[in-house]
Image (cartoon, rainbow, N blue to C red):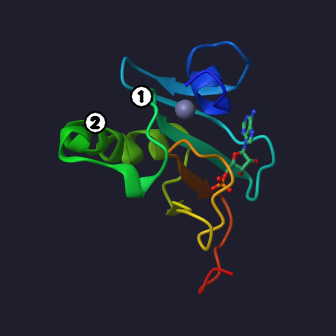
């Protein structure tokens, strides 16, 4: 989608600090980190939110989920981490391209705000 900021990042139209990339997904540092390590994991395909996922995306999302532990290891998160998805208005989703926040290197609190 041409007016989607994460599509632009995936297409290298705007810069990002890339941590991991393959043909289907991209992982890059969040612009406003909420933890010492805070990266965003996105499918390169534009999917607006978790709510928009279809069966056809099962392989893609499975691939992304299986990469979480690999990226966590790459970033030195052997003591644990948190994976967050904000969905829709009540979920406080601000960028309408599916993304998972991977946060680490500090003790998280529960419940999240
Ligand atoms: P959410 O509120 O779950 O939609 O998260 C959107 C996230 O995208 C926020 O944590 C922002 O800091 C982050 N963000 C927005 N624009 C950029 C950008 N150009 N590069 C990296 N992260 C961004
Ligand atoms: Zn997009």
Name the residue located 56 percent from the left edge and 62 percent from the top edge: 86
Query: Residue 96 in the image: x percent, y percent?
Result: 59, 46
Horizontally, residue 53 falls left or right of residue 21, namely left
Name the residue located 62 percent from the left edge and 44 percent from the top edge: 39
Query: Under 8 Å from ligand 2: the CB of mark 2?
Result: no
Horizontally, residue 11 falls left or right of residue 5, namely left
Which tag is nearer the camera, tag 2 or tag 1?
1
| SS at badge 1 | loop
From this viewpoint, which residue is outermost toward the right?
Answer: 32
Mark 2 = which residue? 60
Name the residue located 28 percent from the left edge and 38 percent from the top edge: 63
Query: Residue 53 in the image: x percent, y percent?
Result: 32, 49
Query: Residue 94 in the image: x percent, y percent?
Result: 69, 54
Callout 2 touching callout 1 (CB < 8 Å): yes
Indicate which quadrant contains ligand 1.
top right
Q: Give the label on residue 61, or none.
A: none
Mark 1 = which residue? 45
């Amino acid at each position: 989608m041409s007016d989607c900021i994460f599509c632009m990042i995936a297409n290298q139209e705007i810069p990002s600090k890339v941590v991991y990339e393959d043909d289907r997904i991209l992982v890059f540092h969040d612009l406003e980190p909420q933890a010492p390590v805070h990266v965003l994991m996105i499918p390169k395909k534009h999917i607006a939110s978790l709510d928009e996922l279809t069966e056809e995306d099962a392989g893609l999302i499975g691939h992304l989920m299986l990469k979480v532990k690999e990226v966590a290891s790459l970033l030195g998160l052997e003591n644990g981490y948190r994976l967050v998805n904000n969905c829709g208005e009540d979920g406080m989703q601000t960028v309408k391209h599916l993304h998972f926040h991977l946060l680490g290197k500090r003790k998280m609190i529960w419940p999240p705000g």
